[in-house]
Amino acid sequence: MEYLVDGYNLLHAWDRALPEKDDLESARRRLLDALADFGARTGSRVVTVFDGTDLPYSDRASHREVKVRFSRSPKDADRLIADLLAKTDHARETAVVSSDNAVRAAARAAGAKSASSAEFSALLRRKEASPVARPSGATALSDSEVQNWARTFGVRPEDGMGHSGVKPLKKKGGRK
């Protein structure tokens, strides 16, 4: 699964105590660390898109295994996400993370899954669902949580065990 993340939108949901502007870079770095950990836990690819009209650095970067994109004028992050979706050949294996209704509608129109930033933020915080390093005494996702995430991302838990009891659906001729 590939996750296409509306960066600042998720940052506001994930880090309610958002630092002042002069600390925005460290807030972005903390979010990218959490996304890199999520990608490592789940084996998913993560692309995060930030608004970056007048930033003094490249519009493409990476942070650990997370691909990072910054929009450039006249595009904003929402438009860049829509463009990335339009160019992909695996929209059905893509989940867009944003609370922006237009972005989520574009994702669904392209055949991608979508989740709100609040929903995904809760998933980022569920580190105990990791098959890699589950602390002793940690609990797995409840059956209702598994079913909810399965519906959100279009998978069927009964197809077999995956990263937290959920295995992505295979598409004919496609990738996971």
Image: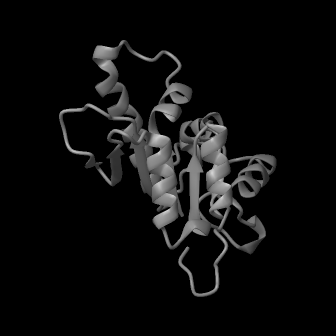
Query: From what the image shows, is residue 33 above or below residue 14?
Result: below
The front one of 85 and 123 is 85
Count every numbered label the image shows and give the total: 0
Query: From what the image shows, is residue 125 above or below residue 17?
Result: below
User: Which residue shows up at 42% across the image and 46% down it?
Assistant: 48
Say whether residue 45 is left or right of residue 65: right
Question: Quarter holding the N terminus?
Answer: bottom right
Image coords of residue 155 (percent x, y) = 71, 65
Image coords of residue 150 (percent x, y) = 73, 57
Say whether residue 166 is left or right of residue 78: right
Residue at the farthest bottom position: 173
Image coords of residue 37 (percent x, y) = 42, 47
Image coords of residue 61 (percent x, y) = 25, 49
Say whether residue 11 is left or right of residue 25: right
User: Which residue shows up at 55% across the image and 73% down it?
Assistant: 176
User: In the rendered image, is residue 133 in sight?
Assistant: no
